[in-house]
Amino acid sequence: MSDIAHYTNYIESLASEHRNQSFLNSSKEHAITVLSTMFKYADPKKFIYIYSGDMNKGIADSTEYTSNLTSYLSKGGKVKILLESHDPNNEPRILKKLRVFKEIGLDVEVKQTGTRIYDTDTNKTLHFAVTDKAHRAEHDIDNFLAVGNFNDTEKSNILIKVFEDVYAKESNRAVI
């Protein structure tokens, strides 16, 4: 079995068993696995919040990511996304798909913000995805290094509060 297959099985077991156990994420493939699994197990009555640079195409346009996010939204799920930057002439396919979902009435909001969120320990830009229980916080955005957990409501609530504070700023621009 390949390393990514072992990692996928490990992440799947943490999520399905709702274990409050931190895990590391150290590659683009790991990011796809973790985020896709978050979408798979997220409560569709709650929001998924994503704070990202520009929705990295190598991650957000992967089949697994797109499929699991689509499935989550089709069950009534809700997603709010904040982007640091957005180029409408070079946007990932997932944003085009989310635009269509919004047009047919699914609960999708995407904004661009001029506000950066920083990791308080390293003072580096922090990108993250969070649900009411699960989170993946990328503390090294150049190397996809992140820490996550599928059942840590305390950390998830902190990240949601940070997200909502930035999301509420009037200077943000609607993308979708």
Image: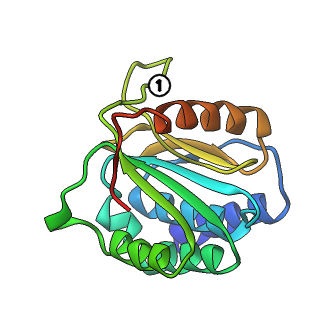
In the picture, measured across the screen, residue 164 lies left or right of residue 60, that is: right
**Can you give x and y, in whole percent of width and height, for residue 142 in the image?**
30, 42
Q: Residue at x 63, y 38 (%)?
A: 160
Residue 152 location, x and y as percent?
77, 40
| Quadrant assignment for the N terminus | bottom right
- The reply, left or right, for residue 28 in relation to residue 57 is right
Amino acid type, mark 1: Asp
Q: Residue 170 falls in which quadrant of the image? A: top left
In which quadrant will I find the C terminus? bottom left
Q: Under tag 1, what secondary structure? A: loop
Identify whether 148 is placed above or below 40: above
Q: Residue at image x 58%, y 76%?
A: 68
To which quarter of the image does residue 158 belong? top right
Image coordinates for residue 133, horizontal then vertical, percent = 75, 48
Pick the front one: 2 or 81: 81
Residue 156 is situated, as x and y percent measured from the top left of the image, at 69, 39
Q: Residues within 10 Å of mark 1 (few under 14, many from 20)?
A: some
Q: Which residue is mark 1?
A: 119
- Residue at position x 55%, y 61% from top? 35
Which is nearer the eye, 83 or 100? 100
Number of numbered callouts drawn: 1
Answer yes or no: is residue 84 visible. yes
Looking at the image, is 31 positioned above or below residue 60? above
For the question of whether residue 1 can be seen, the reply is no
